[in-house]
Amino acid sequence: MRTHVITLGCQMNEYDTLTIRSELVAGGHDLVDHPSDAELILLNTCAVRGKPVEKVVSLLGGLRRERRAGRDVAIGLMGCLAQLDEGRDLADKFGVDLLVGPGAITEIVPAIEALERGRESRRRRARVDRLAFRADLVDHLTPPPPRGTLTAYLTIMRGCDHHCTYCIVPQTRGPEVSRPLAAIVHEAEAMRAQGVEEVFLLGQNVNSYGRDDASLPSFAGLLRTVAEIGFPRVKFTTSHPMNFTSDVIDAIAGTPNVCDYVHLPVQSGSDRVLRRMAREYRRERYLEIVRELRVKVPDVVLSTDIIVGFPGETEEDFAQTLSLYDEARFDAAYMFAYSARPGTPAHARFADQPREVKSERLGRLVERQKHWSLEGNRRFEGREVRVLVKEIGRDGAHAVGHSDQHHTVLVPAAQVRRMGLHAVRVEHATPHALYGSVVGATSVGVALPLAS
Ligand code: SAM
Ligand code: SF4
């Protein structure tokens, strides 16, 4: 079946899309770049906040209109939304043909084939929606990306054992399961053999790796093992403050190709709010980790996730978040207004705050973040950083890549002959990016189509 996949949400979904795409190709199906050429459109969905769900509803509405106008196209819903009652209801409402939860993605190809066989009696829905396939999934090997891919994601664990009261993920992705070490090493070696320069280890809480299975190494041990495979860069996300122990910090500090970049969501600076969120650490413990990181890894770039306007958050609580900002000096942050998600404990127990309160606080936080992002980026002015240049920017004038510390870095496109690692002298910093000049290529790289 000619299939087009639309991916919404986090890197876990992007990784799952890669798995599905390679399964489809191996199963003899064509992938098409444009939705209008497809016989099947797969929506890989996110359910963490209301906005991505609204996006899915709008895509489904558009497809329903096309069908009513006579187009014969099958629709598949996968990802977190597909695992929830909310997703089933939408599937019923919009006549979705395939409903596949995130634990069952390796069952998609047989489900598509069943759908194809039953095509004459269309709208026979194939539902593959339980987490029952998890054991297969963690062992499942995703084929390596095509040659020329510079950055690749590698899932090291699935699911989440935490129960943050605002979050739907434990329900959509089930409990934590670490992937076997052999599967991770196999995928990593295959990626490196294809020329991948930067591997991103993925999981909801990567630093819990191995805690569910005594035969596995700790996350620090896994980091060292993957680093030995020889990638110039190893990055990882997301970390959880709960098990962000000194051995992880030591592994970052002591392993040159493990990058000095840590994404460590704090969610709030107020202990009262952290308690209501059921986050298992308190403000002081979080700041202790930040201090240890900054001492042992002086160039570390630290980013975070924050939720503002959580139910019951007072002005005093919010002031605590602002003051934590001034102590932690985050280089970057993903800042969200609390979004009440049906099925979560917070939705059941607490009343939501008025929208204006949330957006006003979000606005203030964004301004504070801009200040600290600029301060953080200015630390790198005049210095040389290593940049993995991956593409020509939309303006055509700049080539764009990421530093070892994960800054977005722009250099004049005319200075770049090949994609890959370059040494760059940073000339100017903004809150969102570093601007500089290439002083040398540090890897063989890949031919860059647009630079001449
Ligand atoms: N496992 C990671 C952790 O604990 O930090 C993050 C995973 S979660 C999918 C990504 C981010 O979405 C969270 O860190 C949180 O800030 C945000 N998030 C989750 N549920 C939310 C909600 N109901 N409203 C607003 N933001 C939410
Ligand atoms: Fe959601 Fe909390 Fe699990 Fe992160 S740790 S995925 S925020 S429940």
Image (spheres, rainbow, N blue to C red):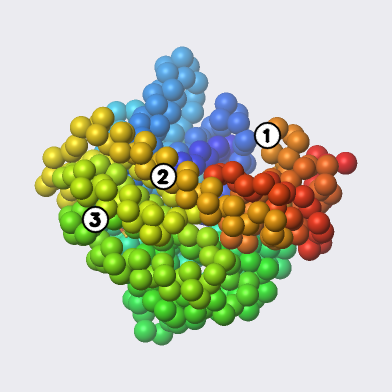
SS type, badge 3: loop
Q: Check the image and report above or below for 71 versus 121.
A: above
> Could you tell me which secondary element the residue under label 1 belongs to?
loop
Q: Residue at x 77, y 50 (%)?
A: 437
* Residue at the (43%, 28%) spot, across then down: 59
Question: Rounded to the nearest whole Å, what is the CA distance between mark 1 and mark 2?
Answer: 28 Å
For the residue pair 153 and 3, the one nearer the viewer reads as: 153
**x and y, in percent, of residue 425 in the image:** 74, 55
Q: Which residue is mark 3?
A: 270
Foreground label between 2 and 3 = 2
Residue 394's tag is 1
Lower sequence index among marks 1 and 2: 2
Could you tell me which residue is drawn at 43 percent across and 74 percent down? 292
Q: Residue 315, how many percent across, how many down?
A: 21, 43
Which one is earlier in the sequence, the residue at label 2 or at label 3?
3
Rendered-image quadrant of the N terminus? top right
What's under tag 2, amino acid-wise? Arg
- The kind of residue on which mark 3 rests is Ser
Q: Residues within 10 Å of mark 3 (few under 14, many from 20)?
A: many
Indicate the amino acid at tag 1. Answer: Arg
Residue labelled 3 has its Cβ within 8 Å of some atom of ligand 1: no
Looking at the rendered image, the disc whose residue lies closer to the viewer, 1 or 3, is 3
Q: Is residue 397 left or right of residue 185?
A: right
The front one of 144 and 329 is 329
Using the numbered discs, state the Cα–Cα distance from disc 2 to disc 3 in whole angstroms: 17 Å
Q: Secondary structure at mark 2?
A: helix
Q: Which quarter of the rendering shows the C terminus?
A: top right
The residue to which callout 2 is attached is 368
Which residue ends up furthest to the right in the rendered image? 452
Q: Residue at x 18, y 44 (%)?
A: 314
Is 239 displayed left or right of 281 in the figure? Answer: right
Residue 120 appears at what percent x and percent y? 45, 30
